[in-house]
Image (spheres, rainbow, N blue to C red):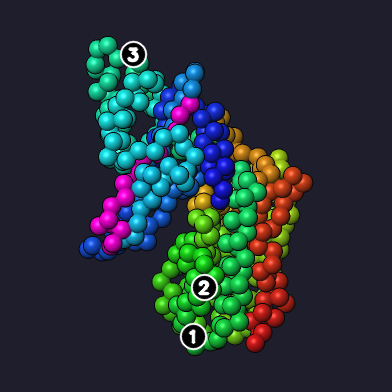
Amino acid sequence: MNEIHFYNRRTQLLSMMEDGVAIITSAPIQTRSNDTEFPYRQNSDFYYLCGFKEDNSILVLTKTAESIRTYLFVEAYNAEHALWNGARLGVEGSRERFSVDEVHDIASYKEMMQEILREHINLYIDLYNDSPRLSEAKNAAQTLHSMRGVKRHVRAIHDVTYLVRSLRLIKTPEEIDMIKKAISITTQAHHEAMRVCKSGMKEYQLQAAMNYVFLSNGASAEAYGSIVAGGNNANTLHYVDNRDDLRDGDLVLIDAACEWELYASDITRTFPINGKFSGAQCEVYNAVLDVQLKVIDSIKPGVKRDWLQRYSEELLCDALITLGVLHGERQALMDAKEHKKYAPHGIGHWMGLDVHDPCPYVDESGESLAFEAGMVMTIEPGLYFRADDESVPERYRGIGIRIEDNILVTENGYENLSAMIAKSVEEIEGMCNQL
Ligand SMILES: [Mn+2]
């Protein structure tokens, strides 16, 4: 992504701030075991504002009535680190690469922070992050507070993430392109899983087939832990074990997608392991699909997210009545939350730099946000009938189905960004039986 996009985002954030200092830190390195680490993944808020992908770096934005200034603190180039882990960009390299006003060695952060804080009354940090770098800033503010002769003290600490994530809610065309790229690779992976799936395989073999598509197309393997759930395993919502057999006559639910340049996709398809839906499977599948299509079709600017949730629950409740799982009147069943037993999760979530993008769902008065062009949300209704649930007609027991697409809100309605992935019974059976 071009440097101008990061510059524009910092300018937007500064325009939302009062006189003050914002500090946003890079993600810490996470130990996997002993002295080995998980692959490094940058903090999404930090990346959003500067595009820098190295660890141990800090972005500082300052604003007074007269001026604004941006600082990036990075680790200096170090030959030893370059030998073992690869070369860092360093102070000089970062100065050339990034359009911030000043780049400094991270070693000078603590001292410089004390100077910068002397000039401001508001501090903007991630209140829910216990990074030592943020504690240093808070301690520096505290020290200044108790000193005589300091011109200005920090008088309020604010949550910077709320501001950044409000910006992240509306995706720019460049961000949509990243998401589309992730989805195009994920599309190939889901189709590959449908093509190679055979009864007798293991769930992890489908996961491996998809990861091959992700990696060989240059994506990071998984935007989140892949769910490959054969048969009744689909009724465990966050099933990630993926070590069971795929059995003839069962469905397999796959919730898996890749990440492209830190942008996520999030796709679920459910298809027959042997390539042919049974009558009972088809009934439940089409019930869920019908709900999904109706919910997607209701998306347009102005529609509120909590209305969408309620609407999807009404449709799922109706589907449960039609299938003969629930008996009675819709409103009474919904009041008693009877439908929640078989449809326990929400209709969808924001998606972007994080698969569950932590953007606000309500405005500052607590009202549900209305859709605006540029928002991206998953729509993922599901019905789950556990094999041992005797309240469910026998023919449906052990069936778990979720169908998930990624929807962009547009000026006039919506665009289903994952519309090209096989979804109707005919399309799926066609893909499963393609050589
Ligand atoms: Mn999802």
Residue 419 located left or right of residue 2: right
Per the model, the C-alpha gap separating discs 3 and 1 is: 70 Å
Residue 41, x across and y down, in percent: 41, 55
- Residue that numbered label 2 is attached to: 216
Mark 3 vs mark 2, CA separation in Å: 57 Å
The front one of 362 and 59 is: 59
Q: Is residue 155 left or right of residue 326?
A: left
Res 291 → quadrant: bottom right
* Secondary element type, mark 1: loop
- Category of crowding for the residue at label 1, using alpha-carbon neighbours closer than 10 angstroms: few (below 14), some (14–19), many (at least 20): some
Q: Is residue 14 above or below residue 375?
A: above
Q: Position of residue 154 (x, y in %)?
A: 35, 21
Residue 429 spot, x, y in % from top left: 68, 80
Residue 380 falls inside the magenta stretch: no
Q: What element does badge 2 sit on?
A: helix
At a point 31% along the width and 30% down the height, the residue shown is 112
Q: Residue drawn at (24%, 23%), measured in percent from left and top?
A: 143
User: Which label belongs to residue 201?
Assistant: 1
Q: Name which of mark 3 and mark 2 comes first in the sequence.
A: 3
Looking at the rendered structure, the kind of residue marked 2 is Ser
| Dots 3, 2 in contact, CB < 8 A | no
Query: Circle 3 sits on which residue?
Result: 151
The magenta-colored residue range is 68-84
Q: Residue flagged by tag 1: what amino acid is it?
A: Met
